[in-house]
Image (spheres, helix red, strand yellow):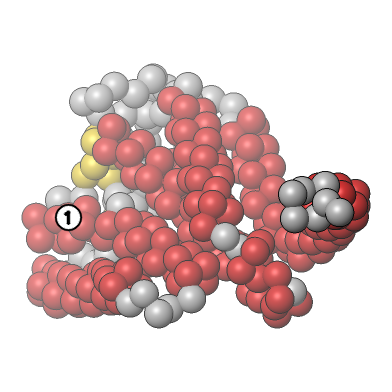
C-alpha cells in the first residue's frame, strides 16, 4: 500500500459481491493531523450556517401570509431539499474527520448514493418549477393566479419527488448487481455514483447509459421547459375560450325562458 493523492490504493485481485459487513475507504482531506481540528471547525461552521439559513427561509415563508404563494412555496421546498442534500454528506464527513477514520460501510455508501441522487434531482426539479412559475408571472400575469393555483403547485412538487425517487432507486439498484472488491477506494469525501461504479469488475455499460439518459431527460426538461410551457398555455387559452363560448350560449338560451316565466306569473297576467 502506498499513499497517493491523500488516499491509499489497495489492489483487489478477486471480484466478489458486497455484503453488509464490507467497508469502503473514502478520500482523506489531509494527512496532517494538525489540520484535522481546523478542517472540522471550518466544515461544521459552514454546515451550521447553511442549515440555519435554510431553516430561517422556511420559517419566514410559512409564517408570513402576505408573501405570494407559488414562488415562495417552491423557495421553501428548495430550501428544505438543499438542507437534506447537505445533511446526507456533511455529517458523515465531520464524523470521519473527528475520528480520523475514513471508512464507510457498504450499506451506508449505498444510502449516501440514494439520498444524494434523490435530493439532487429534487433540487433541480424545484429550480425548473420556479423557472416555470416566473415564466407564467412574466408572460401571463393576468392568468397567474388561475394557472398557479395551490393544486398545481402541490402537483409539481409531487412530480419532482416521484422523479427523484425513481432516478435514485434505479441507480442504487443497478449498483447492487455490480461485483466490487471488498476494500474499495473511493476518491471522494462521499460516495458519489460515478466513483462507486468506476472500479467495478462487472460491466458498467448499462449504469453509464442510465446516467446519460437521466441527465439528458432532466437537462432537456429544464432547457425546453419554456417551449413546453408555451404549448400548455396555448391549450389552456383554447380551453378557456371554448368554456366561455359554451357559458354565453347557455345564458342566451336561458334568458327567453326566464322572461316567459315572469310573464306567465300572477303579477304578469292581464
* Above or below for 247 versus 60: above
Q: Regarding mark 1 in the picture, which secondary structure is present there?
A: helix
Q: Nearer the viewer, residue 267 or 217?
A: 267
- The structure residue drawn at horizontal position 48% and vertical position 76%, both measured from the top left corner, is 68
Q: Quadrant of residue 104?
A: top left
Q: How many marks?
A: 1
Q: Position of residue 107 (x, y in %)?
A: 28, 32
Q: Quadrant of residue 115?
A: top left
Q: Nearer the viewer, residue 224 or 15?
A: 224
- The structure residue drawn at horizontal position 29% and vertical position 33%, both measured from the top left corner, is 106
Q: Position of residue 219 (x, y in %)?
A: 68, 57
* Above or below for 163 versus 98: above
Q: Is residue 10 visible in the rendered structure shown here?
A: no
- Residue 193 located left or right of residue 142: left
- The structure residue drawn at horizontal position 33% and vertical position 77%, both measured from the top left corner, is 64
- Residue 155 located left or right of residue 206: left
Q: Dividing the image into 4 quarters, which one contains the N terminus?
A: top left
Q: Dividing the image into 4 quarters, which one contains the C terminus?
A: bottom right
Q: Nearer the viewer, residue 262 or 107?
A: 262
Q: Is residue 249 visible in the rendered structure shown here?
A: yes
Q: Nearer the viewer, residue 61 or 106?
A: 61
Q: Position of residue 117 (x, y in %)?
A: 46, 47
Most extreme residue toward the front is 270
Q: Position of residue 225 (x, y in %)?
A: 73, 61
Q: Residues within 10 Å of mark 1 (few under 14, many from 20)?
A: many
Q: Which residue is mark 1?
A: 96
- The structure residue drawn at horizontal position 63% and vertical position 37%, both measured from the top left corner, is 210
Amino acid at each position: 500500500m502506498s499513499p497517493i493523492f491523500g488516499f491509499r490504493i489497495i489492489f483487489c485481485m478477486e471480484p466478489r459481491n458486497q455484503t453488509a459487513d464490507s467497508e469502503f475507504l473514502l478520500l482523506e482531506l489531509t494527512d496532517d493531523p494538525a489540520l484535522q481540528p481546523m478542517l472540522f471547525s471550518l466544515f461544521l461552521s459552514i454546515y451550521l450556517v447553511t442549515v440555519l439559513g435554510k431553516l430561517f427561509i422556511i420559517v419566514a415563508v410559512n409564517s408570513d401570509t402576505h408573501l405570494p404563494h407559488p414562488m415562495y412555496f417552491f423557495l421553501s421546498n428548495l430550501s428544505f431539499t438543499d438542507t437534506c442534500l447537505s445533511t446526507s454528506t456533511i455529517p458523515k464527513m465531520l464524523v470521519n474527520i473527528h475520528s480520523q477514520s475514513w471508512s464507510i460501510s457498504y450499506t451506508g455508501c449505498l444510502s449516501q448514493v440514494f439520498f444524494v441522487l434523490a435530493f439532487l434531482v429534487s433540487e433541480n426539479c424545484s429550480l425548473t418549477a420556479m423557472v416555470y412559475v416566473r415564466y407564467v408571472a412574466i408572460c401571463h400575469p393576468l392568468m397567474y393566479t388561475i394557472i398557479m393555483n395551490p393544486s398545481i403547485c402541490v402537483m409539481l412538487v409531487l412530480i419532482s419527488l416521484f422523479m427523484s425517487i425513481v432516478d435514485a432507486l434505479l441507480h442504487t439498484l443497478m449498483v447492487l448487481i455490480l461485483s466490487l472488491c471488498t476494500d474499495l477506494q473511493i476518491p471522494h469525501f462521499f460516495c458519489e455514483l460515478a466513483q462507486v461504479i468506476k472500479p467495478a469488475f462487472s460491466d458498467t455499460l448499462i449504469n453509464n447509459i442510465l446516467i446519460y439518459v437521466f441527465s439528458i431527460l432532466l437537462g432537456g426538461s429544464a432547457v425546453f421547459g419554456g417551449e413546453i410551457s408555451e404549448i400548455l398555455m396555448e391549450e389552456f387559452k383554447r380551453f378557456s375560450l371554448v368554456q366561455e363560448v359554451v357559458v354565453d350560449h347557455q345564458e342566451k338560451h336561458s334568458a327567453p325562458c326566464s322572461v316567459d316565466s315572469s310573464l306567465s306569473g300572477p303579477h304578469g297576467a292581464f
